[in-house]
Image (cartoon, helix red, strand yellow):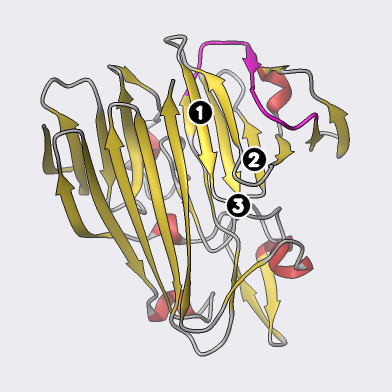
Amino acid sequence: MFIVDNYIEQNCEFVTIKNDNATCWLSLCLTRGGMVTELGVNGEELLYLNKATLFDEQRPIRGGIPILFPVAGKTENETYIYNEKEYHMPIHGFARDYPWEIDATNLENKQASITLSLESTEEMLKIFPFHFKLLFTYTLSNEGLSIKQSYQNNTNESMPMYAGFHPYFLTKDEMIYIQTDSSTYLDLKDNQEKEFNGSIKKQDLEPSIIFTNRKDGSLSIRTPGQQQLIMEYGPEFQYTVFWTEEGKNHVCMEPWMALPNALNDKKDLVWIESNSSLDTFTSFMLK
């Protein structure tokens, strides 16, 4: 059986779900963009989190699973043009900068879910002129976490976006073993396409590397507990970015819908028709 709890820590509101024998758990920080801050499966914590950055609103968060919307990555000069007007767009968008609300919870014997929402405000409209609502349902089980996403466009015109996630997974390996169907990757160190043979040195993930995903595919890495962490995703997520920081015990495995600056160059840009939604998923499972 699963139980849910709410608490406040350093002015941040959290909601947690865990099973009664404490072998799997999920913690979400509503105040800091509805992001996952803890994820435990088979008794193993999977996520890195620098708590000092979580509680300091002046610093970018390092850790957990931040939500990237309406863009993943940077736009050129952090600006974009829409209908001949220039707008400012922060790196990775702004969804992670606003508090999310709980829409629903569902506790069952073998799994539990919680749905969070974020709706556009007048402040958001100044940098992204579209009325929207996001609904993310996090479902936790003994196998892992799935995130069903509904991106709703409530504007009377098509809405451009390319969302993503920025998960920080714990690792103690200096060699990162990645299972993927991709045979090459783009190395942003020199913008060269390179052959991939199944592993890469952790130090070579700076600044980052990018795989082009197969539709309805998956990638996986090894956890510190030597379990296989498998990421699956909907066809909208066309790329996976791998990144780390020097001296840190984490590796980021990030599903993105498009590459940086897509709001300007329009490559792989996702358009949601007026008064409709895009529904997709991402999951992180141990096998």
Q: CA distance from mark 1 to mark 3?
A: 16 Å
Whether 175 is among the magenta residues is yes
Q: State the residue lying farthest toward the bottom.
A: 156
Q: Amino acid at mark 1?
A: Ile
Does the magenta-highlighted stretch encompass residue 38? no
- What mark, if any, has residue 230 been given in the picture? 1
Secondary structure of the residue carrying numbered label 1: strand
The residue beneath circle 2 is 240
> Which one is nearer the viewer's eye here, 208 or 258?
258
Which amino acid lies under the numbered mark 3 shown in the image of this protein? Answer: Pro
Whichever of callouts 3 and 2 sits on the residue coming sooner in the sequence is: 3
Rounded to the nearest angstrom, the CA distance separating label 3 from label 2 is 12 Å
Magenta-colored span: 170-183
Mark 3 closeness class: few <14, some 14–19, many ≥20 residues within 10 Å: some
Q: Which residue corresponds to mark 3?
A: 235
- Measured from the top left, where is residue 150 in percent x and y? 42, 63
- The quadrant of the rendering that contains the N terminus is top left
Q: CA distance from mark 2 to mark 1?
A: 13 Å
Q: Give the crowd class for mark 2: few <14, some 14-19, many >=20 residues within 10 Å.
A: many
Left or right of 88 in this view: 38: left
Which quadrant of the view contains residue 264? bottom right
Kindly report the secondary structure that dominates the magenta region of the rendered protein.
loop
Residue shown at 41%/36% (left/top)?
64
Examine the rendered structure and indicate whether residue 44 appears above or below residue 271: above
